[in-house]
C-alpha cells in the first residue's frame, strides 16, 4: 500500500472529530487502494457480475460514510472497507438468491445469465458462511482471512491492523486456510 499514512490518518481523525468534509478530502488519496481492495474482493466473480468493483467502492463509501465509526489509522480504515465490501457482495448475493425464489419479480428467459448469477451468488454465500463459522470458533483467524484475502493486506499490514506480529499472522493464515479447505473444500484461498 502506498505511503499515505500521515495525511490519511489526519483526515480520518478530522472526520471522526466532526469535520464532515474530511472524508471527501480523503477519498482521492485512498481511491486507488480501495479500487485494489475492491478488485481483490470481487475476484472470482463472473466477469458479467452485476456489481462491478467501481460500484462496490461507491457502495462501500456510502456505508463507511454513514457508519459513524472512529478509525484508528489508514490500515484500520482499509480493513473496515474490505469487510464492508465483502458484506455488500454477500447482501447482493442474498438478494439475487431471494429473487430466484420468486420475490414477485418477472422471470427473464435468459437461462445462461440466470445460471451465472445464481452460481456467483452461491459461491459468495458459501465463502461467507464458512467465514461466519470460522468466526464463531476463532474471530482473529476470520479477521486475518478478511484482511489478506479480501483486503489484499500483507502479513505486516494485517499484523499492524490486528495488533499481532507478522509471524502470528502467518500461523493464523495457514490455519484458517486449512480449516476453510476442510470446511468447504475452498482450496484457492491464497494471498
Image (cartoon, rainbow, N blue to C red):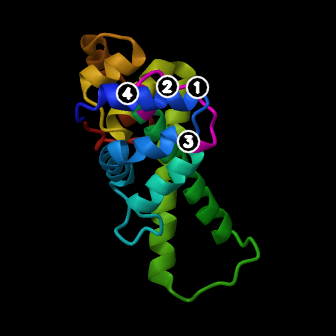
Residue at far right of view:
104
Badge 2 vs badge 4, beta-carbon distance below 8 Å? no
Identify the residue shown where x is 37% and y is 27%. 75
Query: Which quadrant: the C terminus?
Result: top left
Could you classify mark 4 by the number of other residues whose Cα lies within 10 Å: few (under 14), some (14-19), or many (20 or more)?
many
Which mark is on residue 17? 1
User: Residue 131 at what x, y percent from top left?
Assistant: 49, 34
Q: Secondary structure at mark 1?
A: loop
Identify the residue shown where x is 35% and y is 11%. 164
Measure how far apart labels 3 and 2 are at the Cα level.
14 Å
N-terminal of the pair, mark 3 or mark 2, is 2
Residue 69: within the magenta?
yes
N-terminal of the pair, mark 2 or mark 4, is 2
Magenta range is: 65-77
Which mark is on residue 13? 2
Main secondary structure of the magenta stretch: loop
Could you classify mark 2 by the number of other residues whose Cα lies within 10 Å: few (under 14), some (14-19), or many (20 or more)?
some
Badge 4 vs badge 1, beta-carbon distance below 8 Å? no
Badge 2 vs badge 1, beta-carbon distance below 8 Å? yes
The residue indicated by pointer 4 is: 75
Badge 3 vs badge 4, beta-carbon distance below 8 Å? no
- For residue 136, say whether it is visible: yes
Which mark is on residue 64? 3
Identify the residue shown where x is 47% and y is 64%. 51
N-terminal of the pair, mark 3 or mark 4, is 3
Could you classify mark 3 by the number of other residues whose Cα lies within 10 Å: few (under 14), some (14-19), or many (20 or more)?
some
Badge 3 vs badge 1, beta-carbon distance below 8 Å? no
Measure how far apart labels 3 and 4 are at the Cα level.
14 Å
Amino acid at each position: 500500500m502506498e505511503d499515505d499514512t500521515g495525511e490519511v490518518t489526519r483526515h480520518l481523525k478530522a472526520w471522526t472529530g466532526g469535520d464532515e468534509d474530511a472524508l471527501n478530502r480523503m477519498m482521492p488519496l485512498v481511491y486507488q487502494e480501495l479500487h485494489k481492495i475492491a478488485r481483490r474482493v470481487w475476484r472470482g466473480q463472473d466477469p458479467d457480475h452485476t456489481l462491478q468493483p467501481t460500484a462496490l467502492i461507491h457502495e462501500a463509501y456510502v456505508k463507511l460514510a454513514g457508519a459513524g465509526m472512529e478509525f484508528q489509522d489508514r490500515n484500520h480504515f482499509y480493513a473496515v472497507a474490505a469487510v464492508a465490501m465483502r458484506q455488500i457482495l454477500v447482501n447482493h448475493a442474498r438478494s439475487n438468491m431471494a429473487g430466484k425464489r420468486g420475490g414477485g419479480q418477472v422471470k427473464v428467459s435468459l437461462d445462461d445469465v440466470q445460471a451465472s448469477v445464481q452460481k456467483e451468488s452461491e459461491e459468495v454465500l458459501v465463502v461467507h458462511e464458512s467465514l461466519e463459522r470460522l468466526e464463531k470458533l476463532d474471530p482473529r483467524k476470520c479477521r486475518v482471512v478478511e484482511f489478506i484475502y479480501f483486503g489484499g493486506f500483507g502479513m505486516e499490514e494485517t499484523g499492524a491492523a490486528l495488533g499481532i506480529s507478522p509471524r502470528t499472522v502467518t500461523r493464523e493464515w495457514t490455519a484458517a486456510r486449512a480449516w476453510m479447505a476442510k470446511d468447504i473444500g475452498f482450496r484457492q484461498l491464497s494471498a
